[in-house]
Image (spheres, rainbow, N blue to C red):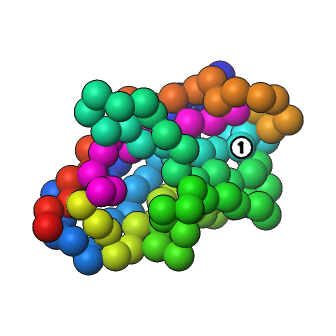
Amino acid sequence: QVQLVESGGGLVQAGDSLRLSCSASGRTFSSYDMCWFRQDPGKDRVFVAQINFAGSSTDYTNSVKGRFTISRPNYKNTVYLQMNNLKPEDTAVYYCAARQSGTGNYNYWGKGTLVTVSS
């Protein structure tokens, strides 16, 4: 069982940076792939970035490549999403998710943190 808590959201201006954090409970955190999704009001939740259980592989949606970085220090049960050069279209609720490595769906979710980017 994994419990996830996101933090770090807020109101920023276009071009600013934010770092989101996802703190995970559970002793087997190191065996979980981690992911960030985001959701605009009235729209589906969409994939943003993913990092594997070992931290050796990452993937990003095209719209954030070169601006966002997902990371997971080995010594902390935390996953970060560093977001640089933010744009108004990045405005959304950001959710952290986890899955046991090797399984299909992300089945553990946090409650989300709101990021608002003004133009």
Which residue is pictured at 51% across the width and 29% down the height? 109
Give the percent coordinates (x, y) of residue 36. 52, 46
Which residue is nearer to you in this view: 40 or 22? 40
Q: Residues within 10 Å of mark 1 (few under 14, many from 20)?
A: many
Which residue is pictured at 43% across the width and 53% down the height? 21
| Element type at mark 1 | strand
Give the percent coordinates (x, y) of residue 29. 69, 41
Give the percent coordinates (x, y) of residue 115. 27, 51
Is residue 97 shown in magenta?
Answer: yes
User: In this figure, which residue is indicated by the disc labeled 1?
Assistant: 33
Toward the right, the furthest residue is 102
Is residue 70 shown in magenta?
Answer: no
Any part of residue 27 in sight: no
Q: Quadrant of residue 59?
A: bottom right
For residue 21, side relative to residue 89 (left or right): right
Where does the magenta region start and end? 89-99
Give the percent coordinates (x, y) of residue 30. 74, 46
For residue 116, side relative to residue 52 (left or right): left
Looking at the image, is 84 positioned above or below residue 112? below
Q: Quadrant of residue 112?
A: top left
Which residue is pictured at 56% across the width and 36% down the height? 97
For the residue marked with disc 1, what is the amino acid? Asp
What is the chief secondary structure element of the magenta stretch?
strand
Which residue is pictured at 14% across the width and 62% down the height? 118
